[in-house]
Image (cartoon, rainbow, N blue to C red):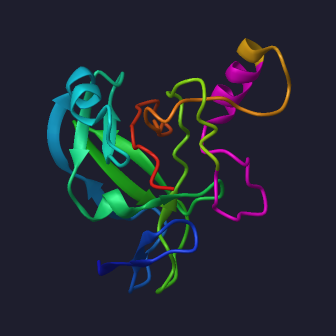
């Protein structure tokens, strides 16, 4: 599969396909060094940018060093992530045309109190945040007010459909 990195309307750089991708195909593997969440927090506490993807319950993370780290968030993504035997795969949810940007829903769940994780995906059904619907609901309940989500620029966490998580600091 031919993937390339180029400018993205969603955020700075994005990952694009140069060939058609069929529904269900593995698009990329999220690879890098495996470290603990605590080590990631120590290493990247003051960093503006990280590419971390949590495995299982989030205790271990992949410190991303691959094409997949450039895949941007979208509330109406064309891919999803799945963890299989310690590997994280980005898999097509539908047919993806040549030239299309590869995206998946980050479904962030972890962050601090002052980061809204604003979404720039431009989808018709955009949530306005990269946080998962469950996290948005939880934050609203904690704040005791409907409306704005709250979070800290400590990192963005992504859930895949099987419930594992990831962390990626804001590039925005």
Residue 140, picture quadrant: top right
Number of numbered markers: 0
- Along the horizontal axis of the image, is 100 left or right of 60? right
Is 121 within the magenta? yes
Residue closest to the eye, 164 or 152:
152
The residue located at (57%, 67%) in the rendering is 10
130 relative to 77, above or below: above
Residue closest to the eye, 95 or 167:
167
Q: Position of residue 117 (x, y in %)?
A: 59, 42
The residue located at (57%, 74%) in the rendering is 9
In which quadrant is the N terminus drawn?
Answer: bottom left
Magenta-drawn segment: 119-140
- Along the horizontal axis of the image, is 123 left or right of 29? right
Residue closest to the eye, 19 or 59:
59
The residue located at (53%, 36%) in the rendering is 108
Q: Position of residue 141 (x, y in %)?
A: 76, 15
**Residue that lies at the very extreme toward the right in this rendered image:** 146
31 relative to 123, above or below: above
- Along the horizontal axis of the image, is 35 left or right of 132? left
The residue located at (55%, 63%) in the rendering is 78
Instruction: Name the magenta segment's main secondary structure.
Output: loop
108 relative to 16, above or below: above
Q: Position of residue 7 (x, y in %)?
A: 45, 78
């Amino acid at each position: 599969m031919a993937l390339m990195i180029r400018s993205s309307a969603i955020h700075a750089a994005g990952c694009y396909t140069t060939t058609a991708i069929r529904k269900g195909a593995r698009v990329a593997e999220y690879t890098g060094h495996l470290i603990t969440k605590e080590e990631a927090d120590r290493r990247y506490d003051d960093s503006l940018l990280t590419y971390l993807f949590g495995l299982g319950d989030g205790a271990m993370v992949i410190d991303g060093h691959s094409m997949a780290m450039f895949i941007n968030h979208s509330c109406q993504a064309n891919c999803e992530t799945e963890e299989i035997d310690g590997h994280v795969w980005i898999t097509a949810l539908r047919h993806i045309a040549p030239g299309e940007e590869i995206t998946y829903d980050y479904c962030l769940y972890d962050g601090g109190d002052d980061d809204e994780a604003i979404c720039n995906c431009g989808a018709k059904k955009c949530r306005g945040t990269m946080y998962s619907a469950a996290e948005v609901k939880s934050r609203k309940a904690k704040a005791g007010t409907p409306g704005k989500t709250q979070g800290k620029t400590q990192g963005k966490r992504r859930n895949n459909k099987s419930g594992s998580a990831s962390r990626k600091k804001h590039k925005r």
